[in-house]
Image: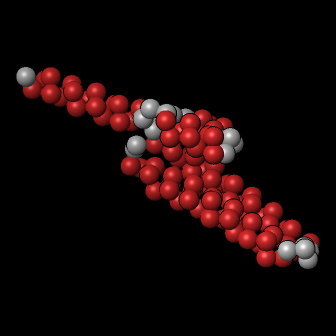
Amino acid sequence: MNPRYRKSTYIGIGGGFVIAGLAGAVIEGFGEKLSTVAIILFTLLALVGAGFYLWGCCSWAKGKGYSGVYGFLLGMLSILGLLILLVLPDKYKLDENLQEGQVKKDRH
């Protein structure tokens, strides 16, 4: 993975899950006494969490050498999209290996 995208991937995906968890905690905390404020707070937290998560998925796809659009579309699939991103080949690493192999061949 391209190191340039590593930090934003971790912050985006991790932050998205944490914020979504907070949104769930808000609803759980209010229990049966749901108010308009609780629903608005939940909605805002859920949207911010989804934004972070999708940003993280875009960064991960870019870090692996794919378009951010792939990351966004896969992120829309939630956990299934994360699993697909996990198994996608890392074009950045493949490029490094090819260049390394080329350097080794040039030395001989």
In this view of the protein, which residue sits in the foreground, 87 or 13? 87
Q: Residue at x 28, y 27 (%)?
A: 98
Q: Residue at x 49, y 35 (%)?
A: 87
Q: Quadrant of the C terminus?
A: top left
Residue 62 x, y percent position in the rendering: 50, 40
Residue 17 x, y percent position in the rendering: 62, 59
Q: Quadrant of the N terminus?
A: top left
From what the image shows, is residue 8 above or below residue 100? below
Residue 33 visible at all: yes
Residue 74 x, y percent position in the rendering: 63, 38
Q: Residue at x 91, y 77 (%)?
A: 33
Q: Is residue 34 left or right of residue 100?
A: right
Q: Is residue 90 left or right of residue 101?
A: right
In this view of the protein, which residue sits in the foreground, 2 or 76? 76
Q: Is residue 39 left or right of residue 60?
A: right
Q: Residue at x 59, y 62 (%)?
A: 15
Q: Is residue 88 left or right of residue 40?
A: left
Number of marks drawn = 0
Residue 41 x, y percent position in the rendering: 80, 70
- Residue 24, located in which quarter of the rendered image? bottom right
